[in-house]
Structure formats: C-alpha cells, structure tokens
Amino acid sequence: MSNKNKGRNGVVYSTNPDYVYESEQEPDTLAPDQQRLYVRREVRNGKPCVVVKDFIGQSDDLKALEKKLKNHFGTGGSSKDGDILIQGDILDKLRQYLQAQGYKTKG
C-alpha cells in the first residue's frame, strides 16, 4: 500500500466522482502528567539509539519534544511515524529527564 492511502482505514473504492475522503484529525496534545511514554533501547544499523513511543498529540508538539531532547543531550535524532529516535545509549538519562519534565515512562 502506498503512503498516500495509509490513513484511509475501511475506504476501498467510491464510484462517486465528487467524493472527498475526510481524514481523521490529529488528537489534541495531552498534558505531560497525563502521558505515559514507552521508552526503550534499540540497535538500528548497528548503532544504539533510544526510541520514545506512545506520544499522544499533534505532530508539531512531537517535533518540539524531539528538538528539546536533542538539544538537552547534544545528540542527533529524528521523529518518524509518531516515534522519537534519539541517537546514543542514554536510556537512563532520558528517562530521568522525561520524568523531571512531568512525563510518566514505562518500558
């Protein structure tokens, strides 16, 4: 399946030429004390990284959290498919930082 149809759950085909698919809107960003982030260490391309999953909110807020983490730890990283990837083996430091910011962590 191509990426352009990835968010179209349940829509197969429409014979109406004027049909416009109404996609779901992004959920509102929850407060940090209401979020429970799943943090784990992974090895990607032979290099260690930390992955933060289960962020509930808009993509702009996800990018802001990613930027805040990268600036604090002085590392690279990216956000992809609702996950934040931070380069390096800094799992314990990242958990402590997120908990200090008010997030609950698991994993």
Image (cartoon, helix red, strand yellow):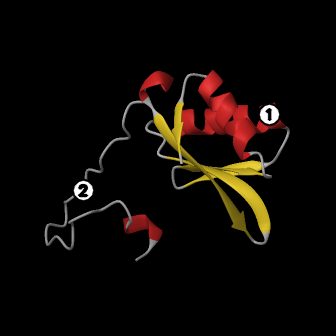
Q: Residue at x 78, y 52 (%)?
A: 89
Q: How many labels does the image show?
A: 2
Residue extending farthest bottom:
1
Residue linked to disc 2 = 20
Determine which of the numbered discs, if any, sits on residue 61 in the image: none
Say if mark 1 contacts mark 2, CB within 8 Å: no
Give SS at disc 2: loop
Q: Residue at x 77, y 45 (%)?
A: 90
Specify the amino acid type for callout 1.
Answer: Asn
Q: Is residue 102 depicted above or below 86 in this figure? A: above
Give how far across and how far down residue 96 sits, in percent.
Answer: 68, 31
Residue extending farthest left:
15
Give how far across and how far down residue 92 sits, in percent.
Answer: 71, 41
Earlier in the chain: of badge 1 and badge 2, it is: 2
Label 1 or label 2, whichever lies nearer to me, is: 1
Q: Is residue 90 left or right of residue 66?
A: right
